[in-house]
Structures are given as C-alpha cells and as structure tokens.
Image (spheres, grey):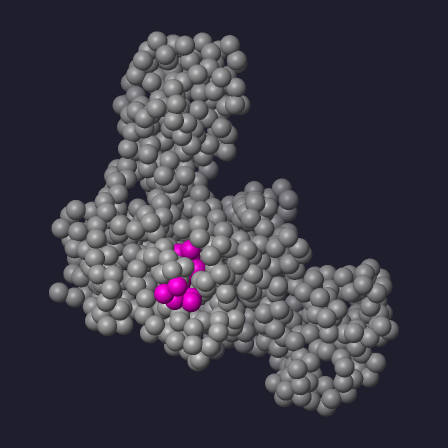
Amino acid sequence: MIVGMEVAERPCLVVGGGRIGARKALTLLDHGAQVTVVSPQLSARLQAQVAAGTVSWLQRSYESMILDEGYLLVIAATDEPSLNFRIAQDCKARGILHCIASSGKLSTVIFPASVNVDGLKVAVLSDGKSPSRSRDLRDVLSQALLERMNSQPRLGLFGARREDVGPEISELLAGHTDARLQENVREIFGSEEFFVLSTCQRLEFYFHSCSDGQLPDRLHKLLHEKGGPKTNWYSKTGLEAYYHLLRVVLGLDSAFVGETDIVGQVRAAARTRFTSNDRSRLKNTIDDVLAAGQEIRRQWPINGQDVSWAQQVCRIFEDRIKSETVGQVLLAGSGRLARQIGLKLAKRGYNLRVFTRRLCGHTERFCREIRATLHSRDQLTEFFPDANGLVLATTSSSPVFGLGDAMQLPRGSIVIDLGVPPNVALEVINALDGRYIGLNDIASKTNYAHNIKQQLAIAQNQRKAFEYALRWHKRMYGPQKIVRQARIGLRPSALSRLQTMELLQALLVIAPRLDVHLVTTETPGDRDKTTPLIDIAQDDFFTRGLDLALLEGAIDIALHSSKDVPSQLRPGLAVAAVTPSFVSNECLVGRNGTSLQNLPANSRVGVSSERRKKGILRLRPDLHVLPIRGNVEERIAQVDAGQFDAVVLAAVGLWRLGLEHRISQWFTTDEFPPPPGQGSLALIVRDDNPELINLLKPLDLGERTHLQWTEQESIS
C-alpha cells in the first residue's frame, strides 16, 4: 500500500552533496521541506541553494549522532554503498524514515515522480523499475493539470482608494448592513465567488475572474459610469492580486503602516460572504493570506505595542487634552472602528456620547458595551458646548458639518476625523486652527517615522510578503521546470552580490531545480571611481558592461538596480521583471552618528547626485555639499577618515550589507524624496528568450511608474 507523506515545513536530512543528493534535496524543496545537507563538498546546484538560504549545509562527514536532531526523513545519497548501508541501519535503529539511493530494498520511503498544481498532488511511481517512464507520465499530467487550471477562474481584484470614489458610487453601494452591501454587489457580479473590502481607506472587490485576466464587464462598466472620470480604478489578477491583499493584511498598504485593524476588517468581510465550513477557492485564498500575515507579523513585528487606529486616537487625546476633569467625548459612528475607539476611551475614563443615523438594537448594545449614551446623529451639534473632543469614525460622501457648527466647539477641544474623504468641509478645518486631526495627521504621529529599528522591521515585512506570495504561486501552479539553468551577471561589489543573493532566494522559491551560475562583469562605473557622477553624460554608466555581456550571450540575466537602468534599452533587450522595493528611503551616515540637524554649519556632506545635493541644501542651506564616489563601504570609510562629516546613501544598501547600525538619520519620503525605483531590482534579458521571460514573470511585482526607462525605446 502507498501512503502519501507531507514534508512541508518539516526537517529532512540529505547525506551527500553530489548529483543524486542535489536531485533529492531539490525534490524535497519542491514540496516545502526544510532541507539540511551533510557533506564535505557540495555540487554547484546545491551551492546556489545554500547561497540563497533555501538549504542548510553541515560541512562535515556523516556521523550517526547527526540523526538525533529530530529529522522526519533521512536520504542517504553518497557515492559509497557501504556508507549508505550504515546510514540505513542507523535510521532503522532510531525509527527514522529513510531513503537509500544506492539500494531501494533498504528504503522505507520511495520518491515518486510527482506534480502539485493548485493543491492537487499526483504521484507516479514504478517501484524504481522505470524512473524515466514515471517522469514522462508526470510531465504529461502536469501539463494537463495546468491547462485545466488555466481554463478556470483566477483570483481577481478591482478597487479604488476611498478618496477617489465619488458620492454616486458610495450611494450605489451603501446599505444599512454589510450584508446589504454584499447583496447590492451580488446583483452586479451575478456570482457567489466574491467579497467586498470596504473601509475608510479603500473599496476593493475580490473574486475569481477568467483566465485571460478580464474583469467582469458589468462591474467595470457600471462603476466607471457612476464614478465618472474622478474614480481611478485599479485591477490585478493572480499573483498580483494575492500579493496586494497580503500587503493590505500586513498594514503595508495603509496610511498608518503596520496597523492591525485591517485584519479584522478582512475577516469580517469574509465572514459576511462565507461560512466557516465553506471550501470555495476564494475562501481558501483568504484563509491562506490571513495565515501568512499572522506568521509574518509574529516573526517580524513592526511595533511591539498595539498599532491600531483606535490606540492612536487614544494617544492623541492623552497628549492634547490636559484637563484633570475629563468632559464629554462625542463619538459619531457605530461601526467596528467606532466600537474599538469607544472601548479604549471608556477604559481611560472618558465620558462618551455616541451619535448615529441608525438607532437600533445593534447601536443600543454597542452603547451599553462602552458605557455611553446614545443619540441621533441630528442631535450632535447640541452637545458641542460641553465637548472636550469630537471623533468622527464614519465615512460620508460629502461634508456633514458646517462652519457655524464648528465655531460652537469649545476653544480647547479637538476634532479627530477618520473619514475619507473628510467628514468636514475645508473651511471648517481652517477655522479649527490646528485643532483638526485628519487621517494623515494620525498616520504622521506614529512613533516610528524616524525610528530605524521599526523602519527595518517594515522592510522585513515587505521582503517576507514578496516571499510568501511566491510560495503561494508555487503551490497554485507548481514549480517552474522548463528553464534548466541560467547565468546571472552581476557587478564586482559586495552590494551587487547581496542583491543577486536576494534574487536567487526569490528565484529558487518558484524554480528550486534551476541551475544558477554567477558571472561577474565590470561596468564603467566600477572602473572609474573618481569622475563626479554629475559630470557623466552616459546614463548606462553602471549597466553597460552587463548589457553588452547579455547581448554577446555570455550571460542570460543582467541584474541592475532599477534606478540605474538607462532611459532607453539597447536593441534586443527587454526588462523581464521589476522586483518590489522593500526600502526606498534615503538616509544619512554621519561621523560619530551625528544627525543632519546636529551637523555644525559649513560641515562637508558627500552626495552622489544633483538630486541629493538639492535635497540637503533644501534642509540645511548652510552646509557644504560635495560630490563623493565609491561603493557604499568606500563612501562610509571617507566619512570615518574625516574627508566628509556625513554622506547621503540609500537606506536599502546599508540594510542589505548589514550596516544599518551606521545610519544616523532615516529620512521620510516626504522630507527627502527618493528616486523612482530605489530599492527594486530590474532583471534584463534578451527579448528572444520567451521561456526565461516567462520564468521571471512571477517576480514582476514591483512598481514601474515614473521609472526613467521604457521597454519600447532603444539605443543603437
């Protein structure tokens, strides 16, 4: 009898680093196992996996005590039959499942030729008698399953930012309950496979669309007509849609980065559409995203404290309202966010009055829970004279408070508005004279805008979201097997090598059997480290050598920083993918950790571009801003040697190099805008290689907007 065994996330050991050991290790990686290889030497294929961090390597000879580390499965794949036999005996004595490559009779586990597409696993085996026939049949089944899956609906997304959604659409979709909203949308979709994520920041529809990526015509046409030209709808399918939803769940696509409220909003939206026992593909995808988000947040928390909007509102009250005797706090709204805010304010002793349009059993229970009195929304202005604060936890299609009403608020009170668009008119905001706090104001008050530790945690969340999205793609579509090997060109610097390792780690998630070779190639920027970049006319200064090597056939993929790609590509080249940027910010490395504001007048600050020069002089016009050349380590060394008092660098470079401790100031993107594409990688290939372009397509999740280059234009 044959029994399938799940090895995903389970520790497995491969003894032997040669050709057979590599094949077995890659098979285990295909199925998500945690693989450790024991061998004094490794083949090139396994070296690439170790470099990418997907395989652990114990560089030593086999000893029986290694088996005591709790491995689920052990594979003996050395070129010594006697050693393989001894490993089999050691495993048998310990009750460990084992596979012996040199003798199938000694094995308790046999590796079938298998395929995994969209969660369906099929295994073909011939008891070791004809592995080639098993593999051939496996390939036929794989192609058939892929064709079948591609003919089925795929994950799709259609949405817009709240500020872009006109009042007509808000009215169209408005309902007295979430269930009513879903019913209105169901009439548009005509399908059960959807759910709506409607929050103060976004309006998004998730569903399963046709394989060609076309969104439901009826939805697009109706919403576009209702919203008019103002509505900027965006759409994504497949991996892009999954990646977007995962970033939403992680709070990475929020004004308040890392906020946790969105998780509850996604869960609530899913509960409205699906029962706990529902096993639809869309429900499974939502569960997968929520589980991935929970795991990433657990391992790399952005903030050790509560990072919810409700918590931020309470902090603002504590900072702004100093009176010992707390007066009235008026809370407009009775939804999930209003409830959270009310509970936290009540816990801190504030006297609450709740105002809502819907006086029903739900709002009565809500008020009892937070110990507040309930009133109609129309009565709100009557209580202004005694209010210490007003919280508008609701979204309206148009401003609901006039200038006269705002003037009745006590001078010391504050207005916190969570509406998008704002619940109050612009003239009211101006009249409140600094006492109005909107959504963006709350986001800007987070305690980690300049906190380097928290910003690096955000970067790690960004990186892991990319990795988990690629894992989902592999589970859905299986590992890529058409391209067998690839030569990646990189520049001769530590940063370029680390960028390549980052690429390798992503590539080997979707194509763990890919045989990768690294080819180091110099560019003019590596040879000339003295000419100021401002004086260099050619915009392919840091890419020319790699692009020429690509055209000559010396490499298959040229790896560039997206911001370095020339404005026009050479004929025969194409950008196959742009990876996401995990960190785009600029930073300052000052001698002895000095920040920009603490630099003495006339200090020397090194910059590598006219853009950075203008940025520094805008913040500190009393400094001497001078050109600096060299790689990241060489520029920092010039600061340490006293040639400069500080240098401006891309934070992502220091993060990749493990030099984040040298950052003395982290600039926000508002105070020091970075160049487009900073932090992302561009993968350039020959345009006559469709198989390689298809292989790299899942990595193309980065932002191409405002990049200086275009794929349509080229240079001779």
Per the image, is 377 magenta? no
Q: Residue at x 19, y 55 (%)?
A: 545
Q: Residue at x 38, y 40 (%)?
A: 52
Closer to the camera, 479 or 626? Answer: 626
Closer to the camera, 410 or 546? Answer: 546
Closer to the camera, 428 or 165? Answer: 428
Viewed as shown, does residue 307 lie left or right of 96?
A: right
Q: Which residues are magenta?
A: 642-654
Please identify the quarter of the rendering in which residue 176 is found: bottom right
The percent position of residue 169, horizontal first and vertical second, equals: 55, 73
- Decide if residue 643 is in sight here: yes
Please tell me whether residue 479 is drawn above or below residue 194 in the rendered image: above
Per the image, is 648 magenta? yes
The percent position of residue 241, horizontal first and vertical second, equals: 46, 55
Closer to the camera, 336 or 300? Answer: 300
Please identify the quarter of the rendering in which residue 56 is found: top left
Viewed as shown, does residue 156 lie left or right of 510?
A: right
Q: Residue at x 36, y 69 (%)?
A: 607
Please tell me whether residue 421 is drawn above or below residue 640 in the rendered image: below
- Decide if residue 154 is in sight here: no
Which quadrant is the C terminus positioned in?
Answer: bottom left
Viewed as shown, does residue 171 lie left or right of 679?
A: right
Q: Residue at x 21, y 71 (%)?
A: 537
Residue furthest bottom as drawn: 404
Please tell me whether residue 536 is drawn above or below residue 276 in the rendered image: below
The percent position of residue 148, horizontal first and vertical second, equals: 37, 42
The percent position of residue 222, horizontal first and vertical second, equals: 49, 70
How many marks on residues? Answer: 0
